[in-house]
């Protein structure tokens, strides 16, 4: 009976039901085309021409060339099925109403973000190179350049978790939280208890999570459970099993705002593997960062604008400004810009920030990423940097969370290693941190992976740092992580079978779709 219960629970899970419904829709569409075409040859010609029309539509789209090529291959090899798959997982699908709403929110953001001209001029005087990078972020991420901000780096999920609990307990006015994955266990259960207590104290608590990211972790309509505790809650891009659903555009951000002057972000979600309470893929190496001061307002606006889009609520952002007394004892520590990336504006902000860091490096570029599925521009930038004598190092996982994705990651090793890029794999397990460190001057910590989904399809966020003392802590952690990692050499690559190499090359061709 126990096993029958588990089987029944699995079969009635909304993810399974959703997949069945999607499968039925695909089957019905294909059957319809088949039924109304007497001659198979005519059907094939029609479907092939239809696939070409969709391919032309993709070519004219404002997306990455690699992404276009991968989809065109699907269209030409699987004409009708390819069109259906593209409808499911392809382009950005925004209605006129959604576009209008986004525009209104954008205007509202602009009205509530303020650039301190003194800080901007100070950065320009100190470094024109840093200033140019910062101006790009400011323009395309609506993120003013900030000082009067302290930063604290956490090299592991356990440290982040303890500090987060401590700061949540101190909240007086409000707590805003936005996460991709939330799963019941020690981490989330302890945070939820604090949130419930804070609601009783009169603290306003808002919680937003990605519905597809949590589809296997949380019950359906879990936001209603949170609402029953007095927590204002909502889901981003709710999973609906119809072919026009926007599956690709997920909310991959991890944001915590406390009283407008304290913020957390990084790669850490609210699940026990992130704090090594449970082991899924060996030791889970992640990181996070806490901001305290003026720069937190950037992140507060990020959260509130997303909340407005999902909930459709209208309220004054100014009511959530930090109290002057909360900012009195903040010590300025370098320049800080929290930034976000939005797939619906067709500007790859996260990738461009990374490319700017690579192209402006003089000594070294140190990177950690769980996935390495990158376009030609990124491959070229990393390769040219290494060929120019810059020390380029990338740490990826030794134990992957997704085996097929890890095969694609390994497919990129050859070209990068031949160019002089040093690739390492983190031996204790899975490294989930997304970090760039450049020349002891710059760093970024956030949610943006080096893969197509993060760079082009997801809502992401991060923190760009210049001349902040935290950069030393980030570099120190990187060097300690290197000691626990194994460098990959071409000699090792040559031992791989031809079949494995061919498999990776084929997967690489479809990498933009993974």
Image (spheres, rainbow, N blue to C red):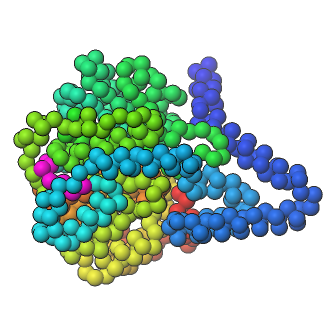
Q: Can you give x and y, in whole percent of width and height, for residue 340 in the image? A: 35, 52
Q: For residue 148: magenta?
A: yes
Nearest the eye: 143 or 360: 143
Name the image quarter holding residue 125. bottom left
Q: Residue at x 46, y 69 (%)?
A: 375
* In the image, residue 382 above or below residue 267: below
Name the image quarter holding residue 483. bottom left
* In the image, residue 27 above or below residue 364: above
Nearest the eye: 398 or 444: 444
Number of dots carrying numbers: 0
* In the image, residue 100 above or below residue 404: above
Q: For residue 462: magenta?
A: no
* In the image, residue 2 above or below residue 11: above
Magenta residues (range): 144-150
Q: Residue at x 63, y 26 (%)?
A: 8
Nearest the eye: 400 or 109: 109
Quadrant in the picture for the N terminus: top right
């Amino acid at each position: 009976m126990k096993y029958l219960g588990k089987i029944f629970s699995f079969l009635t899970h909304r993810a399974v039901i959703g997949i069945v419904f999607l499968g039925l829709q695909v089957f019905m569409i294909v059957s319809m085309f088949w039924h109304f075409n007497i001659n198979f040859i005519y059907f094939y010609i029609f479907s092939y021409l239809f696939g070409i029309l969709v391919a032309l539509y993709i070519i004219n789209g404002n997306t990455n060339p690699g992404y276009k090529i991968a989809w065109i291959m699907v269209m030409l090899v699987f004409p009708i099925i390819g069109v259906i798959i593209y409808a499911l997982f392809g382009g950005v699908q925004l209605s006129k109403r959604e576009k209008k709403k986004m525009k209104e929110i954008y205007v509202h953001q602009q009205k509530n973000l303020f650039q301190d001209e003194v800080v901007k001029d100070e950065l320009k005087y100190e470094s024109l190179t840093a200033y140019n990078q910062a101006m790009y972020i400011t323009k395309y991420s609506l993120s003013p350049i900030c000082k009067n901000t302290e930063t604290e780096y956490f090299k592991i999920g356990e440290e982040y978790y303890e500090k987060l609990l401590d700061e949540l307990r101190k909240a007086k006015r409000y707590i805003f939280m936005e996460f991709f994955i939330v799963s019941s266990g020690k981490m989330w259960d302890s945070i939820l208890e604090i949130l419930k207590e804070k609601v009783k104290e009169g603290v306003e608590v808002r919680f937003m999570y990605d519905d597809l990211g949590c589809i296997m972790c949380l019950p359906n309509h879990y936001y209603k459970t949170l609402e029953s505790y007095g927590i204002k809650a909502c889901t981003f891009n709710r999973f609906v099993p119809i072919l026009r659903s926007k599956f690709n555009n997920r909310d991959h951000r991890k944001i915590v705002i406390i009283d407008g002057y304290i913020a957390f972000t990084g790669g850490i979600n609210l699940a026990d593997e992130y704090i090594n309470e449970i082991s899924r893929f060996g030791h889970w190496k992640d990181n996070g960062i806490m901001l305290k001061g003026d720069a937190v307002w950037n992140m507060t606006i990020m959260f509130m604008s997303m909340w407005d889009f999902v909930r459709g609520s209208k309220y004054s952002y100014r009511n959530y400004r930090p109290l002057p007394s909360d900012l009195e004892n903040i010590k300025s520590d370098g320049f800080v810009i929290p930034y976000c990336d939005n797939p619906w504006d067709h500007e790859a902000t996260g990738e461009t920030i990374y490319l700017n860091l690579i192209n402006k490096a003089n000594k070294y570029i140190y990177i950690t990423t769980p996935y390495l599925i990158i376009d030609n521009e990124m491959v070229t930038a990393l390769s040219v940097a290494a060929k120019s004598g810059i020390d380029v190092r990338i740490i990826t996982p030794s134990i992957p969370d997704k085996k097929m994705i890890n095969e694609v990651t390994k497919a990129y090793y050859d070209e990068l290693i031949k160019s002089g890029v040093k690739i390492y794999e983190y031996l204790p397990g899975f490294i989930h941190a997304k970090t760039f460190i450049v020349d002891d001057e710059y760093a970024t910590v956030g949610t943006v992976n080096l893969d197509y989904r993060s760079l082009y399809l997801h809502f992401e966020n991060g923190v760009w740092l210049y001349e902040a003392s935290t950069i030393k802590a980030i570099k120190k952690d990187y060097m300690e992580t290197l000691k626990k990692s194994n460098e990959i050499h071409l000699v090792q690559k040559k031992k791989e079978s031809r079949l494995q190499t061919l498999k990776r090359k084929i997967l690489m061709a479809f990498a933009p779709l993974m």
